[in-house]
């Protein structure tokens, strides 16, 4: 059987389905910011950005862009009714104080025990980019990761142990890749969903860490 990898927008759309009513959510730079465009309009969800914004909506149309209304990734955003701005220090207090229900981050690697590496590949010419990821990784109640399952050279990003510098230890709760949805549990990595046409055995061959088949559990 053949299978089709999810696009970045499809990954974002899938994550959006799992964000519950009333959640305070931080969307990391890159792919995670796309999630804002797929949240159900009848759900009240509070999107937070570490530069001091709460209550963001989907991306604006080009003609509606406001240069003073951006997220931490310097992308244009909209502000929903009741949204607000506040000091950068207060924003990090929210993150460090356990007031964020879910944060969604990108990753270079995720380990079988939930370790996260997403700020530096360790390469001499790479530009480190910590941002608020370390604060979010330990401060958010749940950490979701969105990423392509493989690197451009075909190596698994899901590994038994991270080889890149860590962002957080044992912090990841769920992985959303372009091939599968995987929970990080005390028993190991449990596969909950795979893309149509992909067998569990094929997914395991593409993954460096040991997987548990939880699709029919």
Image (cartoon, rainbow, N blue to C red):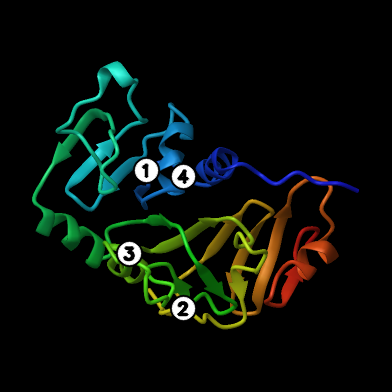
Between circles 1 and 3, the one closer to the viewer is 3
Which badge, 1 or 2, is on the more N-terminal residue? Answer: 1
Residue 114, percent across and down? Answer: 52, 75
Would you identify the image quadrant in which residue 70 lies? top left
Which badge, 3 or 2, is on the more N-terminal residue? Answer: 3
Q: Which residue is mark 3?
A: 133
Q: CA distance from mark 4 to mark 1?
A: 6 Å
Q: What residue do we see at 63% from left, 60% from top?
A: 149
Q: Which residue is mark 1?
A: 22
Q: CA distance from mark 4 to mark 2?
A: 32 Å
Q: CA distance from mark 1 to mark 2?
A: 35 Å
Between circles 3 and 4, the one closer to the viewer is 3
Quadrant the C terminus occupies = bottom right
Q: Which residue is mark 2?
A: 164
Between circles 4 and 2, the one closer to the viewer is 2
Which badge, 3 or 4, is on the more N-terminal residue? Answer: 4
Which SS class for mark 1?
A: loop
Residue 52, percent across and down? Answer: 17, 48
Q: CA distance from mark 3 to mark 2?
A: 15 Å
Q: Which residue is mark 4?
A: 20
Outermost residue to the top: 63
Which badge, 1 or 3, is on the more N-terminal residue? Answer: 1
Q: Are there few (<14), some (14-19), or many (20+) residues within 10 Å of tag 3?
A: many
Would you identify the image quadrant in which residue 180 lies? bottom right
């Amino acid at each position: 059987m053949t299978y089709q990898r999810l696009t970045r927008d499809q990954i974002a759309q899938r994550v959006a389905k799992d964000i519950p009513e009333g959640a305070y959510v931080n969307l990391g730079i890159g792919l995670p910011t796309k999630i804002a465009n797929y949240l159900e309009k009848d759900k009240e969800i509070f999107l937070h950005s570490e530069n001091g914004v709460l209550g963001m909506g989907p991306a604006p149309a080009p003609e509606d862009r406001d240069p003073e209304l951006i997220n931490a990734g310097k992308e244009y955003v909209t502000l929903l009714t009741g949204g607000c701005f506040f000091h950068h220090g207060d924003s990090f207090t929210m993150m460090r104080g356990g007031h964020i229900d879910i944060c969604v981050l990108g990753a270079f690697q995720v380990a079988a025990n939930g370790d996260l590496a997403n700020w530096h590949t360790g390469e001499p010419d790479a530009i480190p980019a910590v941002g608020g990821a370390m604060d979010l990784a330990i401060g958010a109640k749940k950490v979701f990761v969105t990423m392509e399952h493989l690197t451009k050279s075909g190596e698994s990003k899901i590994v038994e142990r991270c080889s890149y510098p860590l962002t957080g230890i044992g912090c990841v709760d769920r992985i959303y890749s372009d091939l599968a949805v995987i929970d990080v549990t005390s028993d190991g990595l449990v596969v909950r969903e795979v893309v149509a046409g992909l067998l569990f055995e094929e997914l395991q061959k593409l993954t460096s860490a040991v997987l548990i088949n939880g699709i029919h559990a």
